[in-house]
Amino acid sequence: MLLKIVAVGHPVLRQTPRTLTPKEIRSPEIKDLIEHMRGTLRDAPGVGLAAPQIGQSLNLAVIEDRAEYHEAATAAELKERERVPVDFHVLINPRIELLSDSQVSFFEGCLSLPGFMAEVPRSHSVRVTCLDHHGKQKVIEAKGWYARILQHEIDHLQGKIYIDRMQSPTFSTLDNYQRHWKNRVVNR
Ligand code: ZN
């Protein structure tokens, strides 16, 4: 079942979602929700989807960066972004630590703001402590693009959207991103 993705301006994107208990996480309702979010994320397609984006104020997000999504990028782009495939997984009740002193800036988009992108400074590496789909505690250490995806999704779980952190003058339609920004040397 494909879920409807809510767009920016919907109040649910600005609420702090409630945490889930390990017992709830193992319930058929949450198992189904995760499966539907997986299908919706692949259909979009996207690399991350947080429960508030499908109108559910729950502290849960799914992430998957498939190798086939990288085919549109050049080897240089992938290398610069330190982008490698990430298997499908769930983040529940995450806590994030930013591990880098300096930030890296790249363009990113969001399924709740279709058709737009902006340059967003993010920590190069992070440590995330969360529960997995079994309700078991898990620690993720990530860098590069995966660290960016984690920061973007965990922002959603704190009522934040990338436009709160973007370098505003870079905010672009997808078309203008391709035309004017894509090949610009980014500010590291
Ligand atoms: Zn998003």
Image (tube, rainbow, N blue to C red):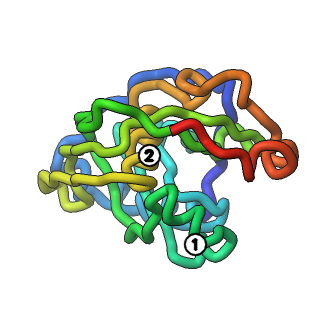
Image quarter where ligand 1 lies: top right
Q: What is the secondary structure assignment of the residue under circle 2?
A: helix
Relative depth, front residue between 180 and 56:
180
In x, y percent, where is residue 159? 46, 25
Q: Is residue 25 left or right of residue 9?
A: left
Relative depth, front residue between 167 and 152:
167
Rendering quarter of residue 13: top right
Relative depth, front residue between 153 and 3:
153
Neighbour tally class for label 2: few under 14, some 14-19, many 20 plus, Cα within 10 Å: many
Q: Earlier in the sequence, mark 1 or mark 2?
A: 1
Q: Is residue 106 visible?
A: yes
Picture disc at residue 75 = 1
Q: Please tell me which residue is depicted at 17% across the width and 50% down the height of the picture.
A: 23
Ligand 1 within 8 Å of the CB at mark 2: no
Relative to residue 61, is residue 68 depicted above or below? Answer: below
From the image, which quarter does the N terminus lie in?
bottom right
Rendering quarter of residue 135: bottom left
Q: Which residue is identified by label 2? A: 148
Q: Nearer the viewer, mark 1 or mark 2?
A: 1
